[in-house]
Amino acid sequence: MRLVERDYQILREIDRWRFCLSRHIKLIGGFGSQSACDRRLRLLREAGFIDRKRVIYGVPSEYYLTYKGKALLGLAHKLDKIRLEQITHDIAVLDTVMYFFLKKGIPLADILSEKQLHSLDGFGYRKHRPDFVFTKGKKKYCVEVELSPKTKERFEKNMRQNFDTYEVQHWVVPRFPAFTFRQNSTALQRDSRCPNRLIFAGFSG
């Protein structure tokens, strides 16, 4: 199989998000149709660079890198674990990434995933990191996808930590608990350390 730059881009994106669905890969690779995307994915599978599995019934198959795919990119020979309890959240994160990529014009190359942020932290105490971050202009943005309400204490702690590093926070939450998230942010909005740059968006999963 002759690899082209688009194939490398697909492999890199799969790696940094741990897995991708075919609908995400279609957008990442700029394919004209889903069938064209699926044909290319089949070739990459047959060449041994990627594989797929269906972890939860009703959820599309997740594509992930094989050892051969990792080696091609010069990455550590350790396969990423697809966490059963995180699949719905991780898919929602990828959907949100695609929204910022297509609708807000944020290049994928300018986006850092949570996995990449933890890698930059190195070893030691594992800090809270947003689901992904990017820089636009001179401002740093972070994006958090929360599909279930957190305790008020944990929510405020994560929000304060984000405000220490990022000028703008985007919180993508289900429509039904959005009011709770806004309530929990009231005290922070009055905090002089926290500028009024908190953006909420409803997520209907």
Image (cartoon, rainbow, N blue to C red):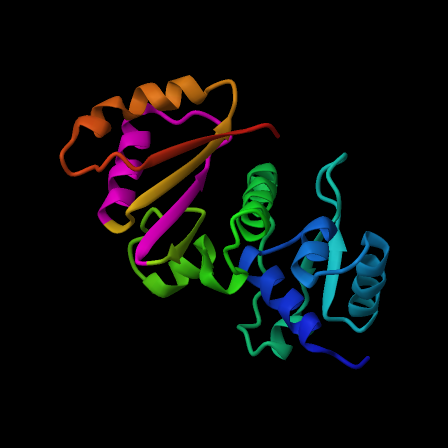
Region of the chain picked out in magenta, as a range: 138-164
Q: Is residue 58 left or right of residue 148?
A: right
Q: Residue furthest left?
A: 192
Q: Quadrant of residue 162?
A: top left
Q: Is 122 above or below relative to 18? A: below
> Is 158 or 70 nearer to us in this picture?
158
For the point 44% across and 53% down, the residue is 114
For the point 23% across and 28% down, the residue is 189
Q: Is residue 205 left or right of residue 118?
A: right
Q: Quadrant of the N terminus?
A: bottom right
Q: Quadrant of residue 35?
A: bottom right
Q: Quadrant of the C terminus?
A: top right
Q: Is 77 above or below relative to 22? A: below
Task: Count up the numbered dots.
Answer: 0
For the point 53% across and 72% down, the residue is 76
* Any part of residue 79 in sight: no
Residue 176 drawn at (x, y percent):
51, 18
Q: Quadrant of residue 120?
A: bottom left
For the point 83% across and 63% down, the residue is 42
* Residue 48 inside the magenta-drawn segment: no
> Is 3 or 71 nearer to us in this picture?
3
* Residue 160 inside the magenta-drawn segment: yes
* Any part of residue 149 in sight: yes
> Is 72 or 124 nearer to us in this picture?
72
Residue 186 drawn at (x, y percent):
26, 22
Residue 131 drawn at (x, y percent):
45, 47
